[in-house]
Image (spheres, grey):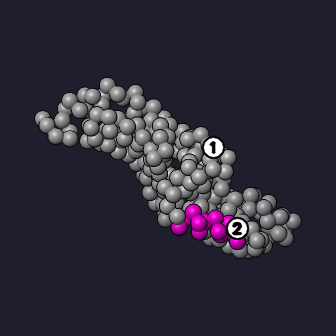
Amino acid sequence: MKGPFAWFKWQALFTERQAFAEGLGVTALVALMALALAIILGILVGMIGSSRFKALKAICRVYVEFIQNTPLVVQIFFLYNGLPYAGLVLPVMAVGVIGVGVYHGAYISEVIRAGIESIAKGQLEAAYSQGFTYWGAMRFIILPQAVKVVLPPLTNQAIFLVKNTSIMAMVAGGDLMYRADSWASETLYYGPAYVVTGLLYLAICLPLSRLARRMEGGKEAAA
């Protein structure tokens, strides 16, 4: 058989499976670290966005609007090519973690803020009456109640985050997409390279997608 999916091309890819496995490992590691950063940023910015601290809210709003309204590829390009002019050279993996984490942190902050605002305001007022500070009330009273609301959209953000790690390919990040691009460019066997890459991303994202749907179904049933 000839064409983009000829059998000998699949055989060639199988002999290079270790490179794809290593790329998958890098993708998984970057995704986990970026997700942790995104959640930390999201919770912090989301809490500030629901507070009465006007100056901090304005700063966080600028962050969210800037990140959400500029392409991720531009942000990664700045981190990789722009920061060295300021004397700061980041490792490629750090570029991926920071770029993807900060990008999705802006979206997660909106999820957190919506979850906080879904809780009755009387809960916060009751916490104040018991001597809680704003941050203490958030930590012990508001956020625990908001968890059920925010988990499904957070899971969806995790899916988008995993797929967006492919942006590291543009800075030779060693991730799965970079390995696929490099191997396909060397061999011209693009068909098998991208089919396998797509299936590997699917293997990570599909369980997360099913988990998100299950949680949404459970939330509707509880309602």
What residue appears at the point 16 percent right and 40 percent down from the top-left corner? 3
Which circle's residue, 1 or 2, is located before the other in the chain?
2
Residue type at numbered disc 1:
Val
SS assignment for the magenta stretch, majority: helix
Give the distance between the C-alpha atoms of the residues marked 1 and 2, in whole angstroms: 26 Å
Vertical side of 217 occupied by 203: above or below: above
Residue position marked by numbered label 2 in the rendering = 59
Query: Is residue 59 in the magenta section?
Result: yes
Residue 169 % position (x, y):
45, 44
Please provide percent x and percent y for residue 175. 46, 39
Residue 176 belongs to the span the image colors magenta? no
Residue most toward the left? 1
Q: Which residues are magenta?
A: 58-69
- At mark 2, the secondary structure is helix
Q: Residue at x 82, y 69 (%)?
A: 128
| Residue 100 locus on image (x, y percent) | 55, 51
Q: Amino acid at mark 2?
A: Ile
